[in-house]
Image (spheres, helix red, strand yellow):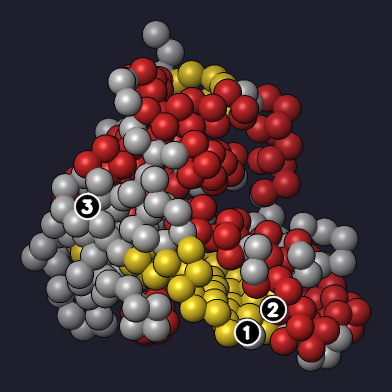
Amino acid sequence: MSDTVHFSCGDLEDLMFAALVSSGTSEKNARSVARALLAAEIDGRKGHGFSRIPSYAGQAITGKVDGQADASIMKELPGAITIDVKKGFFYPAIDLAFDYFPDKARTNGIAAVAFHNSHHCGVLGHHVEKCAELGFIAIVMGNTPQAMAPWGGTKPIYGTQPLAFASPRKSELPLVMDMAMTQVARGNIMTAQQAGKSIPEGWATDAQGNPTTDPEVALSEGVLLPVGGAKGAALGLMVELLCAPLTGSALSTEASSFFTTEGEPPSVGQFLITINPDAFSGRDHFLERVETIMESITGQEGARLPGGRREALRKEAAENGLSVPAKLVEEVKSLAAQET
């Protein structure tokens, strides 16, 4: 038996959709989630793709995430919105945000969206890329369950604290930067665990502060290391302030795990800022100067832009589909076949 199973993109999305619906998620929410996970799988971000279905479905079954939640606007000002995710999935909530903030950013020059009582936010780069396709510069970030210690400390205070930035370009795909404030996102460690593989030294320590290559130890009792040392830890604090106190959501130390089915909903927060270039130097000037910078990078031998593989990966998936672990396929098919 092969270790992998091949799917067309549409069939893989439909399988994920079916597993979520059978686990108590509304069809609207399940389609939004499945679409987001498929996009992650296509772009090679497997820790945020198909591998998430067992934990997402399990949490929908136990109520740790409310698969039926209908996100709504809590507060609205000319340039600011707060969305109550209602302890449901993040993806339908950011879909809702796109119905509101573009007009605000065009009118006011800038618009921000706070997401309250939210869940795992997946590949944040996809959301800012969509903003950039609409002509906006965008920054989005989220706090996550505790995983990283403050610099010099040994106990986790911050999460992996993902942050993404996107800028429109004249005729190319938007420039997208997407990173965790830790050396690696927890999803990458989960993927290694599912595959029975070790993780590189330098990603995490055990509870005593010793380096570990065991993904089980890293996920259950370990501490993830910040990217860039003290600078990464400081950025983790910045994300925490903008995504927990500002959105009225749980601190990283209060949030339950994204991976387990036990416990209360994580109730974390996300924060999105969108900027209209027309309000500042002007769109044409901005795009022209962006290309000057891009050409100065790509003109150097060996230099590359962040996210440069996206176009090739998307073309490959559209033409040839995707291969995913056979063991995981069986687990997801079992979820899809269960009685609702």
Q: Which element type, helix, strand or loop, lies under badge 3?
A: helix
Q: Indicate the amino acid at tag 1.
A: Gly
Residue neighbourhood size for the residue with mark 2, other residues' Cα within 10 Å, grouped as few (<14), some (14–19), many (≥20)? many
Residue 59 location, x and y as percent? 27, 43
Instruction: From the image, tell me which residue sits under label 2.
Output: 104
Q: Which mark is residue 219?
A: 3
Q: Nearer the viewer, residue 310 or 96?
A: 96
Residue 235 in view here: no
Q: Are marks 1 and 2 in contact (CB under 8 Å)?
A: yes
Q: Which element type, helix, strand or loop, lies under badge 2?
A: helix
Quarter-of-image position of residue 288: bottom right
Q: Nearer the viewer, residue 87 or 15?
A: 87
Measured in 3D between alpha carbons, the distance from the residue under mark 2 to the one under mark 3, in whole angstroms, is 40 Å
Residue neighbourhood size for the residue with mark 1, other residues' Cα within 10 Å, grouped as few (<14), some (14–19), many (≥20)? many
Q: Are marks 2 and 3 in contact (CB under 8 Å)?
A: no
Q: Residue at x 48, y 32 (%)?
A: 17
Instruction: From the image, tell me which residue sits under label 1.
Output: 79
Q: Indicate the amino acid at tag 3.
A: Leu
Number of marks in the image? Answer: 3
Measured in 3D between alpha carbons, the distance from the residue under mark 3 to the one under mark 1, in whole angstroms, is 39 Å
Residue 311 location, x and y as percent? 73, 46
263 over 140 or under it: above or below: above
Q: Residue at x 55, y 31 (%)?
A: 13
Viewport quadrant of the N terminus: top left
Q: Nearer the viewer, residue 115 or 295?
A: 115
